[in-house]
Image (cartoon, rainbow, N blue to C red):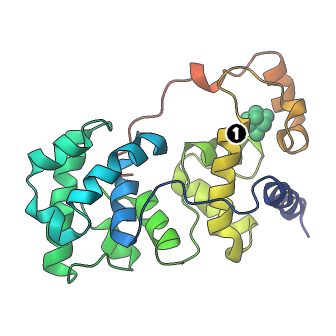
Amino acid sequence: MSALSDKARRIEAILDELHPAPPIPLDHVDPFTLLVAVALSAQTTDKKVNQVTPALFARAPSPQAMRELSVEEIHALIRQVNFAGTKAKALRRTAEILCDEHGGEVPASFEALVALPGVGNKTASVVMGQAFGEETFPVDTHILRLAHRWGLSKGRTPDEVSADLKRVFAHSSWNKLHLQIIYFGRSHCPALRHDLTKCPICSWAASKARIAAESRGLTKPKSARKRPPRATPS
Ligand code: SF4
């Protein structure tokens, strides 16, 4: 077994201990409501999305009901999320396409999903994984940062990092690890400077050079970094 596989197994064992059964953080009841929730979560916290979706899903629990609403009505229901105007237009158009081209259902096909307005690789992967049970490894900002810190990937884009993670972790663990790493990042990675030597994973998985650089303050805390360019679709 390579050193990288060994490291991946150790990381997975720690994540299994810390987050044995990570729940899906976005409230939903079926593939359509999951697709909508994930689309709304771009550049918006899951908590905010979960505050908005009960009223939205009460009015539009299905593509058929969503297409009955005007863009303005959808916008009024989701105005608390970022980019509400763009997302309202995309949701309305998505509902039309689902009704006209997919029999009113969310297609269980990655290619068909990324063809929907505002749906990129990450959203399609989340829906394929969490609604249809396909093992996928969507990469958000937490996962991208931690894959770098843990020395599992040098990829520059979410797609490159996802490909690296798929190489080092067993296929059957991808969906679980996607959620576990997100929860680990949320619970362990502070906004301000922190001590890598006290972290259950970075303390042994990060390179000595990175630990030394961070302890000398040579790398910026995440709160001080420039935000990555907005990626829509997500
Ligand atoms: S050292 Fe910091 S960035 Fe690395 S996993 Fe731990 S808390 Fe997160």
Extreme-bottom residue of the structure: 103
Q: Residue at x 88, y 58 (%)?
A: 10
Q: Residue at x 69, y 56 (%)?
A: 180
Q: Is residue 16 visible?
A: yes
Residue 77 % position (x, y): 22, 45
Q: Residue at x 38, y 38 (%)?
A: 230
Could you tell whether 81 is left or right of 159 in the image? Answer: left
Quadrant of the picture in which ligand 1 is shown: top right
Q: Is residue 172 above or below residue 118?
A: below
Q: Residue at x 76, y 61 (%)?
A: 20
> Which residue, given by chain and number where applicable, does mark 1 sit on?
187
Inspect the image, locate mark 1, and give the three-letter code of the amino acid beneath it. Ser
Could you tell whether 201 is left or right of 75 in the image? Answer: right
Q: Is residue 5 above or below residue 155?
A: below
Can you tell which quarter of the image residue 97 is in? bottom left
User: Residue 163 versus residue 137: which sits nearer the camera?
Assistant: 137
Can you tell which quarter of the image residue 3 is in? bottom right
User: Residue 165 versus residue 105: which sits nearer the camera?
Assistant: 105
Q: Is residue 176 above or below residue 214?
A: below
Residue 178 % position (x, y): 63, 59
Residue 76 % position (x, y): 17, 41
Q: Is residue 56 above or below residue 67?
A: above
